Image: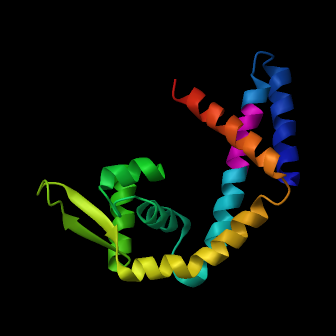
Amino acid sequence: MADFATTEQRLAVTCRRYPDFPRRPATLARLIKHIHKQLHDQVNLSLKPYGINHPEYNLLMMLYGSASGTMSPSELADAAGEKSANITRLTNELCDKGLIDRSGSADDRRKIELSLTPQGQALLESLLPDICTLLAGQGRHLKVSEQVQLEKLLKKFLSGLAD
């Protein structure tokens, strides 16, 4: 948290220089940025032995968690919070690794459907125990009730960004 102490000092200076600066929302935004970086770095370290990175893992998990087992590139982009250009690059990489397939939709030949290959499914199922351990460790300093409360607050914060 030493990194964040420096951020708080800069925010304090900013508030002194510009008294109308919204310190609390700015602090939340910076905390979320710091949390994202730490989570991203930890997941990448855990995934390295499996030959994939965090964005690739996210796409694989979106497909794994879809009821139909397929998603269009635009659905995948929305679910993963990625831009369409990045989805194209990532799905190309995952196809090249043999982890996902692209196929035409049975309903609309113009529509592309993405799905996990058996190799992609097997990879996910082999790495999920490590990811479960990592996720449990990341939340270990919060009681279950605090995790529930934080989830509600973050959802409320996120919905306010969509207004």
Magenta portion: prevailing SS class: helix
Residue 89 visible from this viewpoint: yes
Say if the magenta span includes residue 102.
Answer: no
Q: Where is residue 95 in the image (x, y as percent from the top left)?
A: 32, 74
Viewer-closest of 77 and 148: 148
Q: Where is residue 11 in the image (x, y as percent from the top left)?
A: 81, 33
- Left or right, residue 103 beside residue 82: left
* Residue plotted at (85% across, 30% down): 13
Residue 97 visible from this viewpoint: no
Say if the magenta span includes residue 30.
Answer: yes
The vertical placement of 36 against 159, above or below, is below
* Residue plotted at (74% across, 44% down): 148
* Residue plotted at (70% across, 44% down): 32
Query: How many numbered circles does the render carry?
Result: 0
The vertical placement of 135 against 157, above or below, is below
- Left or right, residue 24 beside residue 130: right
Q: Position of residue 43 (x, y in %)?
A: 64, 68
- Left or right, residue 142 beside residue 98: right
Instruction: Specify the color scheme.
Output: rainbow
The vertical placement of 163 against 141, above or below, is above
The residue lying furthest to the top in this view is: 20
Give the magenta-colored segment's residue range.
Answer: 26-34
Viewer-closest of 77 and 14: 77
Quarter residue 129 falls in: bottom right
The residue lying furthest to the left in this view is: 109
Q: Position of residue 5 (x, y in %)?
A: 88, 45
* Residue plotted at (32% across, 50% down): 74
Viewer-closest of 114 and 19: 114
